[in-house]
C-alpha cells in the first residue's frame, strides 16, 4: 500500500512538473541586418568573422552587398565594422563588451552572406564557422581554425586551417602559386578540364588521385611526397595535410 502511495505521489509530482512552463530565455535576440558598400573595380576586400559562418557569392556590379544574421544573449548587439577607404574594403564582426553583471552563458553568433565582385582580391579570416566561396576569379586567401572551407576559384588560392577540412574546385590556370594547407583536416581538391596545375602534395595520411603521380617517402616521419600534373605548363600548387588525407581528382 505504501509503495502504491509513493508511486502515486511521484507520478503526480512528475505531471505537475511537466505542466509547469519552463522559464523563457531572457535577452535572447535574432536580428537580420543588411548593408552595402560601393567599390572600384578590382578593390581588395577583407572579411573578418570569428563568430559564425562566412559565405560569398559573385556580385553583378561593383557593390558589395552584406546580409548578417545575428544571434546574441547577455551581450550587446554585434556590430559590423565597415571601413571603405584607401582603395580597400574591410568588413569585420565585432561584439562590444557587456557592461555590468552578466548572468548565464553568452550567445554570440553572426552568420555573414556577402555578394562580392569576382575580380576583387578577397581575404577571409574565420575561426569555427564554415567559410564558403563560390564564383570567384581573383586572388583568394582564407584562414580558419576549426571551421571547414569550401571554395571555387579561377585564380591564385591560399587556404590554411588547423582542424577544418578543405574542399576546393579549381577552374583555370592562375598566374601565381597556390597553397592549400591543413594540419589535421582532410583536403579534397577537384580540377576542371582547363585547370592546369603542377601539384606537389605532402601528408602522413592517404593520397588518392585519378591522375598519374609519383609518390616517395621522405624523412624520419616517413611523409608521403606526391607530384602530378593536371595540364601542360601548369601553375604551381602546394598541398600540405600533415595528419589528414589528400584527394586530387578530376572534376566530374
Image (cartoon, rainbow, N blue to C red):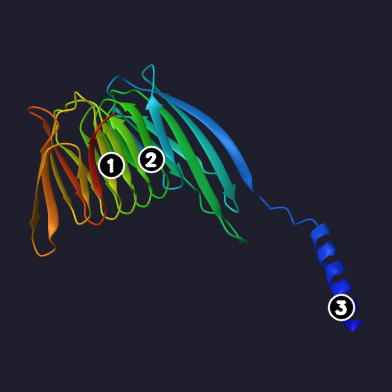
Q: Earlier in the sequence, mark 1 or mark 2?
A: 2
Q: Position of residue 23 (x, y in %)?
A: 74, 57
2 and 3 marks in contact (CB < 8 Å):
no
- Which numbered circle lies on residue 246? none
Mark in the foreground, 2 or 3: 3
| Residue pointed to by mark 1 | 188
Quarter occupied by residue 47: top left
Q: Position of residue 117 (x, y in %)?
A: 34, 23
| Residue pointed to by mark 2 | 131
Q: Earlier in the sequence, mark 2 or mark 3?
A: 3
- Label 3 sits on a secondary structure element that is helix
When the figure is inspected, residue 74 is found, relative to residue 247, above or below; the finding is below
Q: Position of residue 62 (x, y in %)?
A: 36, 19
Q: Quadrant of the C terminus?
A: top left
Q: Residues within 10 Å of mark 3 (few under 14, many from 20)?
A: few
- Residue at the image point whose x is 8% and y is 27% from the top: 232
- Residue at the image point whose x is 31% and y is 20% from the top: 40
Quarter occupied by residue 132: top left
- Residue at the image point whose x is 38% and y is 40% from the top: 131
- Which numbered circle lies on residue 6? 3
Q: Residues within 10 Å of mark 1 (few under 14, many from 20)?
A: some
How far apart are the two marked residues, 2 and 3, measured between alpha carbons?
A: 56 Å
- Given residues 100 and 219, the one toward you in this image is 219
Report the label total: 3
Q: Position of residue 54 (x, y in %)?
A: 42, 38
- Given residues 129 and 206, the one toward you in this image is 206
Amino acid at each position: 500500500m505504501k509503495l502504491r502511495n509513493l508511486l502515486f505521489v511521484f507520478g503526480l509530482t512528475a505531471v505537475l512538473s511537466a505542466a509547469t512552463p519552463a522559464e523563457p530565455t531572457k535577452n535572447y535576440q535574432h536580428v537580420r541586418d543588411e548593408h552595402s558598400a560601393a567599390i572600384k573595380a578590382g578593390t581588395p576586400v577583407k572579411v573578418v568573422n570569428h563568430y559564425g559562418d562566412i559565405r560569398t557569392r559573385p556580385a553583378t556590379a561593383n557593390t558589395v552587398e552584406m546580409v548578417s544574421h545575428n544571434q546574441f544573449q547577455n551581450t550587446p548587439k554585434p556590430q559590423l565594422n565597415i571601413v571603405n577607404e584607401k582603395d580597400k574594403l574591410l568588413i569585420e564582426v565585432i561584439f562590444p563588451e557587456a557592461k555590468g553583471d552578466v548572468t548565464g552563458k553568452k550567445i554570440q553568433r553572426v552568420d555573414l552572406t556577402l555578394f562580392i565582385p569576382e575580380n576583387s582580391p578577397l581575404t577571409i579570416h574565420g575561426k569555427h564557422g564554415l567559410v564558403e566561396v563560390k564564383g570567384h576569379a581573383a586572388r583568394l586567401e582564407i584562414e580558419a581554425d576549426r571551421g571547414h572551407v569550401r571554395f571555387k576559384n579561377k585564380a591564385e588560392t591560399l587556404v590554411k586551417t588547423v582542424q577544418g577540412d578543405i574542399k576546393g574546385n579549381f577552374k583555370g590556370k592562375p598566374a601565381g602559386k597556390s597553397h592549400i594547407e591543413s594540419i589535421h583536416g582532410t583536403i579534397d581538391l577537384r580540377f576542371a578540364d582547363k585547370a592546369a596545375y603542377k601539384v606537389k602534395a605532402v601528408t602522413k595520411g592517404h593520397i588518392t588521385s585519378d591522375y598519374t603521380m609519383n609518390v616517395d617517402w621522405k624523412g624520419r616521419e616517413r611523409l608521403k611526397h606526391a607530384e602530378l600534373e593536371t595540364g601542360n605548363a601548369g601553375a604551381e600548387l602546394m598541398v600540405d595535410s600533415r595528419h589528414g588525407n589528400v584527394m586530387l581528382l578530376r572534376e566530374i
